[in-house]
Image (cartoon, helix red, strand yellow):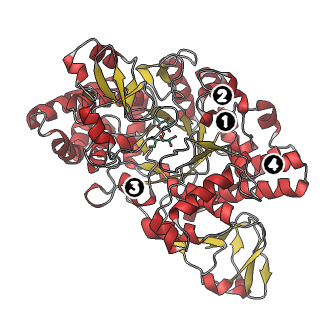
């Protein structure tokens, strides 16, 4: 009897099988979204045609990767996964330069490389590349699409997954769709939210918030050429796409598949919360957003199944979970989403020296795990920090939401007495009292101030804050994302103020260029840079060896009755980790029994490879200490 090897399935067979697998999860949200705008048969035919075409164009080596990922769909949740986030120019000058830095990424333990926006931006101020005028081209200052593909290929060969930014809430006003709309083309006018007069915009404004109240107040911009108002949530040159139009879905889906076919394995979907508008609401997190994300993800699972999606929804703790899928969407929406809440709680805990708000918030709003999806955990990124703490959560630990948010902004701007931070305000909104914060990880954790004082003890304390944070994001679950330069403690960079295109946006302060002189010798240097680098490297290397630290092992937030220590349990199949994080500058003790442990027989701490220090029946943590206790 002869057998046909599975690999003899034709490309057409594979497409058909994957269509059958995903059709219902793709078409159901599409019909919900666009059933009124397009006949279901036409919608199905159009999406199928698009997917067929992009599948036919997909390079053979990526089709092999598709097969591997179909077999191991949770590949990105392995404990070896760790991300690195960088601007191509600031990290390596160009796309080609990035390829040359692969050995550096490997030495740090990186398996996922996020290229910050690198598609052709509008000229001048482009919001750091988040105003794209051509999605089919790499920014020519960085290289070409062929060079991106080649860099991606080299990364693939070393098992690093390239991630690329896909800005899909808006295009630049210079994008050809916007140009056509301005020229009066009705088809492309339907791609945006346009209004003949200010009546409807003003009605929306009653409930909308402002993302950039200082640099771009309001949410609409009058375009004199068209004589119409345009929805512009962010800057005036970023035109919001009209996602209620199925043609927008089809056009953007085509772009996403082109990027996947160029070698992007992860797509960071920018500002997704804003994609659906509904009168009388803040127009964020509407249920349709989750339908759009599911449809994108399911479409890619047919035509480019190796691809996963990371949602950027920087929203409140009570609004985050649907992005990873719950109820009817479980396991089908985004594969990753930023854990904005964990990030905010880290900073809040450092400022207050208390863990109670962190424990309460993370216990209240988040399940222990998801289905085939997880968090991207991080301490800093290229954006400001918005103090996303709800009034209810604040009240639960005896403070007011408003008071606590103001305190955090004051503390990290360095104005609060005794603050160790060197940050700056961002988008202070006089009307609402809201203020956000800029600053690099090192400057916000006190390293800048400590270096100025020259006090070795203060420098060491700041380093500990940084490394405790990295142990937290690497131990928590999901994928830890390291922001370029944080691994060597780069400080705020004020040089942006001299560039007229950047001067108006203080977020450039924490986007310094990579310092290769420092990074090059960091593995051996007896400096704070070296100590931070080795600390981060050690944390990632340790994590990579521990099955219980896989991204998708459930995370149990422990209420251990201690308001200075944050405690979690990762309960794996074969082993277990109890993570304990000291958010204070003082030594702390906790009874072993509070964590269900026997003081006479304490498990080994993975980070030091020794049992923790003990005082009678209590576990001792040094200032800003982190323990990963391993129960095998
Ligand atoms: C995202 O930002 C990007 O990360 C920012 O760099 C862009 O300016 C913005 O979109 C527009 O493309 O939309 O869902 O500073 O935290 O606007 C959250 C505010 C976003 C950002 C927020 C964020």
SS state under label 3: loop
Work out whether mark 3 precedes mark 1 in sequence or the reverse, and give the earlier one: 3
Work out whether mark 2 precedes mark 4 in sequence or the reverse, and give the earlier one: 2
Is disc 2 in contact with disc 3, using a CB cutoff of under 8 Å? no
Q: Nearer the viewer, mark 2 or mark 3?
A: 2
Q: Residue at image x 70%, y 60%?
A: 468
User: Which one is in front, 167 or 573?
Assistant: 167
The residue carrying pointer 3 sits among few (fewer than 14), some (14 to 19) or many (20 or more) residues within 10 Å by Cα, namely many
The residue carrying pointer 2 sits among few (fewer than 14), some (14 to 19) or many (20 or more) residues within 10 Å by Cα, namely some
Q: Is residue 279 left or right of residue 598?
A: left
For the residues labelled 3 and 1, the Cα–Cα distance comes to 36 Å
Q: Quadrant of the C terminus?
A: bottom right
Q: Nearer the viewer, mark 3 or mark 4?
A: 4
The residue carrying pointer 1 sits among few (fewer than 14), some (14 to 19) or many (20 or more) residues within 10 Å by Cα, namely many
Q: Which residue is mark 3?
A: 372
Work out whether mark 1 precedes mark 4 in sequence or the reverse, and give the earlier one: 4
Q: Which residue is mark 4?
A: 449
State whether residue 91 is above or below residue 436: above
Q: Give the label on residue 509, or none.
A: 1
Q: Is residue 116 left or right of residue 608?
A: left
In the figure, residue 300 lies in which quadrant? top left
Is disc 3 in contact with disc 1, using a CB cutoff of under 8 Å? no
For the residues labelled 1 and 2, the Cα–Cα distance comes to 13 Å
For the residues labelled 3 and 4, the Cα–Cα distance comes to 42 Å
């Amino acid at each position: 009897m002869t057998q046909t090897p599975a690999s003899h399935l034709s490309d057409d067979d594979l497409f058909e099988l994957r269509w059958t697998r995903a059709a219902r999860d793709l078409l159901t949200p599409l019909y919900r979204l666009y059933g009124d705008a397009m006949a279901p048969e036409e919608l199905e035919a159009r999406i199928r045609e698009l997917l067929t075409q992009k599948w036919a164009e997909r390079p053979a080596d990526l089709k092999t990767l598709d097969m591997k990922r179909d077999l191991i769909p949770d590949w990105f949740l392995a404990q070896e996964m760790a991300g690195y986030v960088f601007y191509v120019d600031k990290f390596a000058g160009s796309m080609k330069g990035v390829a040359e830095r692969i050995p550096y990424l490997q030495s740090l333990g990186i398996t996922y490389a996020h290229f910050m926006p690198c598609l052709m931006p509008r000229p001048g101020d482009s919001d750091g590349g988040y105003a794209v005028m051509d999605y089919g081209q790499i920014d020519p200052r960085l290289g070409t699409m062929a060079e991106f593909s080649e860099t991606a290929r080299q990364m693939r060969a070393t098992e690093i997954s390239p991630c690329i930014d896909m800005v899909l809430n808006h295009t630049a006003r210079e994008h050809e769709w916007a140009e056509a709309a301005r020229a009066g083309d009705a088809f492309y006018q339907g791609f945006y939210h346009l209004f003949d007069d200010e009546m409807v915009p003003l009605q929306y404004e009653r409930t909308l918030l402002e993302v950039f109240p200082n640099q771009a107040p309001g949410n609409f911009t009058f375009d004199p050429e068209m004589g119409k108002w345009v929805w512009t949530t962010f800057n005036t040159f970023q035109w919001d796409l009209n996602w209620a139009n199925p043609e927008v879905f089809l056009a953007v889906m085509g772009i996403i598949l082109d990027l996947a076919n160029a070698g992007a394995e992860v797509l960071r979907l920018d500002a997704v919360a804003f994609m659906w508008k509904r009168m009388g609401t803040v127009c964020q997190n509407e249920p349709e957003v989750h339908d759009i994300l599911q449809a994108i993800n399911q479409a890619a699972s047919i035509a480019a199944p190796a691809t996963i999606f990371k949602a950027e929804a920087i929203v409140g703790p009570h609004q985050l979970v649907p992005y990873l899928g719950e109820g009817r969407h479980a396991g089908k929406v985004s594969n990753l989403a930023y854990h904005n809440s964990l990030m905010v709680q880290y900073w809040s805990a450092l400022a207050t020296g208390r863990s109670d708000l962190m424990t309460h918030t993370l216990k209240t709003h988040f399940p222990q795990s998801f289905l085939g999806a997880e968090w991207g955990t991080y301490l800093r990124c290229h954006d400001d920090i918005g103090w996303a703490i709800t009034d209810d959560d604040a009240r639960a630990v005896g403070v007011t939401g408003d008071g606590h948010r103001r305190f955090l902004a004051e503390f990290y701007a360095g104005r609060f007495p005794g603050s160790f931070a060197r940050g700056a305000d961002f988008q202070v909104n006089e009307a609402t009292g809201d203020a956000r914060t800029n600053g690099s990880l090192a400057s916000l954790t006190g390293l800048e101030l400590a270096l100025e004082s020259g006090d070795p003890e203060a420098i060491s304390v700041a380093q500990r804050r940084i490394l405790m944070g990295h142990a937290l994001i690497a131990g928590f679950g999901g994928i830890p994302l390291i922001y370029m330069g944080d691994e060597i403690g780069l400080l705020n960079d004020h040089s942006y103020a001299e560039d007229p295109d950047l001067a108006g946006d203080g977020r450039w302060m924490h986007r310094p260029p990579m310092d290769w002189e420092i990074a090059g010798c960091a593995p051996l240097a007896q400096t704070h840079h070296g100590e931070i680098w080795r600390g981060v490297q050690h944390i990632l290397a340790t994590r990579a060896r521990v099955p219980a630290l896989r991204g998708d092992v459930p995370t149990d937030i422990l209420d251990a009755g201690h308001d200075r220590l944050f405690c979690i349990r990762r309960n794996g199949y074969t082993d277990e980790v109890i993570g304990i994080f000291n958010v204070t500058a003082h030594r702390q003790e906790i009874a072993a029994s509070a964590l269900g442990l026997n003081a006479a027989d304490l498990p080994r701490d993975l980070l030091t490879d020794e049992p923790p220090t003990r005082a009678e029946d209590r576990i001792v943590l040094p200032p800003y200490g982190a323990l990963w206790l391993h129960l095998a």
